[in-house]
Amino acid sequence: EISRAASAEQVLERERWDLRAGLRYAQDGFSSEGYVSPRLAFNYRLSPDTRLSASAGLFYQSPRYLDRAADASNLGLANERTAHLSAGFTHRFNDRWDLLVEAYVQKLDDLVTEDVRTNRTLSNDGEGTNYGIDMVLARNFANGLSGNITYSYNDLRIDENDGLGEYDGDDNRPHFFSVGGSWEISKSWLLSARMKWASGLPIDDFIIHDDVLGPDGPLLRYSKEQTTRNALRADDYYALNLRVDYRRPLGWLDLVAFLDVINVIGGDGASPDEFNPRTGLNVADEEE
């Protein structure tokens, strides 16, 4: 199948403000549906150090190829739609420190949902809301040092319109915080580090059944029955990542070598726990 897309954009600039308007048209080769996506962005310079901004638009996301391939009836799935609205500001305190704050709200429609688990037939019955705020305090590079502190709040709620009500979206992390920086030790060596902490991802509520093979079975085994989607939450995620870069010019080429050390402190929450049918417990991957 062939998908087509075209876009156009117009920019209007004045001394203290600018307006950017765009329009995108895309045709889905699978469903033969056409999608028109208007976008609008506005910036206003309140002062030399403060800028206000706002944006709005419609965005479409094509269903995954795996979902469409799961059943012939899924080929006609529509694109998922997101109506987005955001507003924020940036402020420069001095030559070294900047602050960015942006709040957003999104309305989600035509989300792909599962109709029948056994044959993987899907539909576009889902809808949802997503809102949050992002904040970044950044130190610009000076005297070999740079860094930033970030915080995000997010609330993603999904309703599949199946009579079971809303639930937290799979990517819902209410709080995310990180602090990182880099130090240019010399023209050849650069050291950087970042610490992250975030709320755990939502997970399904469940019931553990024991001795599922029966008293006459050859082995003792447990099973895990999912009861309520994303009603619980996994452990908080935290990690410390380190990186060392080495640069050296070789004529007209630059040699760059680096060493990344991920999750130095072995923080929890990097991946969901796995159910062990032999013990009836949820354990981390490395504990299997």
Image: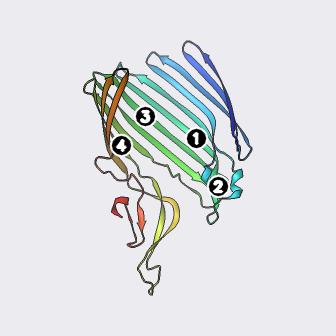
Mark 3 vs mark 4, foreground winner is 4
**The N terminus is located in which quarter?**
top right
Cβ–Cβ below 8 Å for labels 4 and 1? no
- Is residue 221 toward the left or the right of residue 75 in the image? left
Q: Amino acid at mark 1?
A: Gln
Q: Say which of 66 and 237 sits in front.
A: 66
Which secondary structure lies at badge 2? helix
Q: Say which of 274 and 92 sits in front.
A: 274
Furthest toward the front, the residue is 251
Q: Name the N-terminal-most of marks 3 and 2.
A: 2
Question: How many angstroms separate mark 3 from mark 2 (CA)?
Answer: 40 Å
- Expressed as whole percent of the image width and height from the top left, the position of residue 267 reads 32, 51
Mark 4 vs mark 1, foreground winner is 4
- Expressed as whole percent of the image width and height from the top left, the position of residue 209 reads 46, 75
Question: How many angstroms separate mark 4 from mark 1 (CA)?
Answer: 25 Å
Q: Name the N-terminal-most of marks 4 and 1.
A: 1
Question: How many angstroms separate mark 2 from mark 4 (CA)?
Answer: 37 Å
Q: Amino acid at mark 2?
A: Ala
Q: Amino acid at mark 4?
A: Lys
Query: Which mark is on residue 69?
Result: 2
Q: Which residue is drawn at the image coordinates 58% and 46% (left, top)?
A: 129
* Residue picked out by circle 3: 135
Q: Which residue is drawn at the image coordinates 28% and 48% (left, top)?
A: 265
Cβ–Cβ below 8 Å for labels 1 and 2? no
Question: How many angstroms separate mark 3 from mark 1 (CA)?
Answer: 18 Å
Which secondary structure lies at badge 4? strand
* Residue picked out by circle 4: 196
Q: Which residue is drawn at the image coordinates 61% and 64% (left, top)?
A: 117
**The C terminus is located in which quarter?**
bottom left
